[in-house]
Image (cartoon, helix red, strand yellow):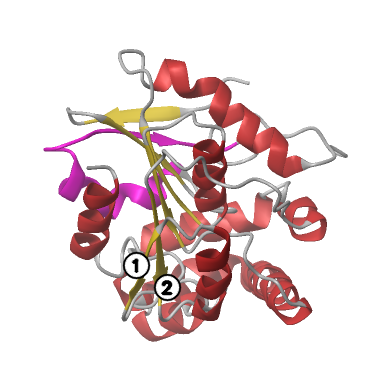
Amino acid sequence: MQLAYEVHGRGPTLVLVHGLTHRRQAWDPVLPELVQRRRVVTVDLPGHGDSPLVPPGTKDVHRVILDAVDGMLDELAPDEARPHVAGNSLGGWVALQLAARGRVASATALSPAGFGTSRADRLLTKVVFRGSRSLARANGERLPAMLRNPLLRSVSLAPFFGKPWRVDPAAALADAHALMSNGVVDQILDQGFPDEDLTAPEVPVTIAWGRRDLLLPVHQVRAARRRYPQAKVVVLPGLGHVPMSDDPVRVGMALLAGSA
């Protein structure tokens, strides 16, 4: 599967993988922190952005997404045996799985999916995604005005961002449309995340979790520590589930350190 991607900057390649219903533009806030020291490749996952759709009825959508990114690595980093990779949420799960396969030089995962061990954790994720989608659809033509209002934007985006008022209104509107039109979100929410893969010991792994994460709460970091005892695990105060616009400098530093 040929995925859509963009290349920015120079240096060792760092592939950035977004989360569920997002697009490669989710990384735009941190690009200025990275492009002087990394060749940054931002990718649209299957069923997202400008990449091909996932066929309806596909079983094990997670593996289809993972295999698609894996199959693109040689094209994304043609001059390197193994690029660095970082991801957020679903993209964090992808990054850790690529590390488990030994396909990358390092993996940095920001609030990675797959560590919600309780029924309550899984129910919360479904309620937030489906509730946010229903809210966006119900407001329809009012969405642009709502998201231009800092207060309404903050209330609407609070489950995803620690500092939602910092999100660009145009980006918030594009994300809302992506959420409403995404064709794989229900499949991924219903199928859950497989957890059989562990990271290859020789691949450096960093797991960073926003303390204000309301979608995948920070207590899930305990499961991450148990499954990846060799990983560097950090909690980022004041940051939410999608932390790139919350604090671009701090997130950029985490990505640079993880891919050092």
Q: Quadrant of the C terminus?
A: top left
Q: Quadrant of residue 12?
A: top left
- Which type of secondary structure does the marked residue at label 2 adopt? loop
Task: Please name which of the two marks, 1 or 2, marks the residue nearer to the observer.
Answer: 2
Question: In the rendering, at what x and y percent does residue 51 appear?
Answer: 57, 31
- The dot on residue 167 is 1
The magenta span reads: 24-45
Q: Residues within 10 Å of mark 1 (few under 14, many from 20)?
A: many
Q: Quadrant of the N terminus?
A: top right
The residue singled out by tag 2 in the image is 161
Q: Is residue 117 magenta?
A: no
Indicate the amino acid at tag 1.
Val
Indicate the amino acid at tag 2.
Phe
Q: Is residue 129 above or below residue 74?
A: below
- Which type of secondary structure does the marked residue at label 1 adopt? loop
Q: What count of labels does the image hold?
A: 2
Badge 1 or badge 2: first in the primary sequence: 2
